[in-house]
Image (spheres, rainbow, N blue to C red):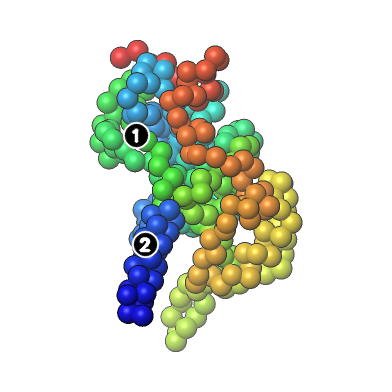
Amino acid sequence: MKTFAWTLVLVLLAIGGAIAQTAPEPVILEHAPPMGFIVVRSSTPGCEPTCPEWISAQGYIEAGTPALLKALLKKLGHRKLPLVLNSQGGETEAAMALGHMIRTGGLDTMVAKTVFSECAPDAKACGPDDLHFGVANPIGAVCSSVCAMVLASGVRRLADSRAFVGIHRIMLPTIKKIGGNKTIVLVRVPEWYERKIDRYFTEMNGGSWILSAMQKTPDDSIRYLMTYELLDLNLINEFGHADTHTSIDICKTRPPADNCRTVRQ
């Protein structure tokens, strides 16, 4: 009997280990930096001189975030690069402004962490046109809270099964007097603002029960959605590996993907 019990324990541990490897926990940063936008070129060996490029969008979405993306898109001109998201959320109005800009610009969105191999954001660029190099890694990447609203705005939108897309109740910051002092507190959004959010998702062709699902999840927690839920809600409209937008293979087709560019060093 003891032998059977130990065997059962070992089997359960093995299963637990396998689950942990295939479903890593999202990495949550308590004090995420503000979101920045950087054009990244794949550092995967073998792609030069024609490599895929994308826009890294990582960090907390703030009121000034849309202006940063607007400036970058103006600089890029006619080029339409996929937006690679890794964010725990931020401000609702800013997220919707980003979403409208992304949809108007005809950009794709996906969830992945941009891992810089050289020429990181805080270093000088190491090539023409302010080149930075890295890879897009979906494992443990997060797009939660209002980031899901940004994800929904892409023309093509993708979340690898190894990434995490989470939702919760939308709250708005409000100034209240507590003990004679003015303090910023989070309050539930009024009905008119819920209708505004609902209209936003309708514009993005989102599922009819997105807002309902968000408002049923307490704001101090996150409901991470399964792939079938993401597809049902139309937060994503295709399923596949993150390489769908960033693999060097997409630059070897004829013609190459739109986000491939030839750079002669």
Q: Is residue 7 left or right of residue 149?
A: left
**Quadrant occupied by the N terminus:** bottom left
**Which residue type does callout 2 highlight?**
Ala
Q: Is residue 76 left or right of residue 201?
A: left
Image spot of residue 220 (x, y percent) = 49, 72
Residue 194 picture quarter: bottom right
Q: Secondary structure at mark 1?
A: strand
| Neighbour tally class for label 2: few under 14, some 14-19, many 20 plus, Cα within 10 Å | few
Of the residues under marks 1 and 2, which one precedes in the sequence?
A: 2
The residue carrying mark 1 is 134
Q: Nearer the viewer, residue 8 or 191?
A: 8
**Which residue type does callout 1 highlight?**
Gly
**Quadrant occupied by the C terminus:** top left
Image spot of residue 253 (x, y percent) = 52, 17
Residue 235: mark in rendering: none
The residue carrying mark 2 is 14
| Neighbour tally class for label 1: few under 14, some 14-19, many 20 plus, Cα within 10 Å | many
Q: Nearer the viewer, residue 15 or 124?
A: 15
Asked if residue 208 is positioned above or below residue 153 in the image, the reply reads below
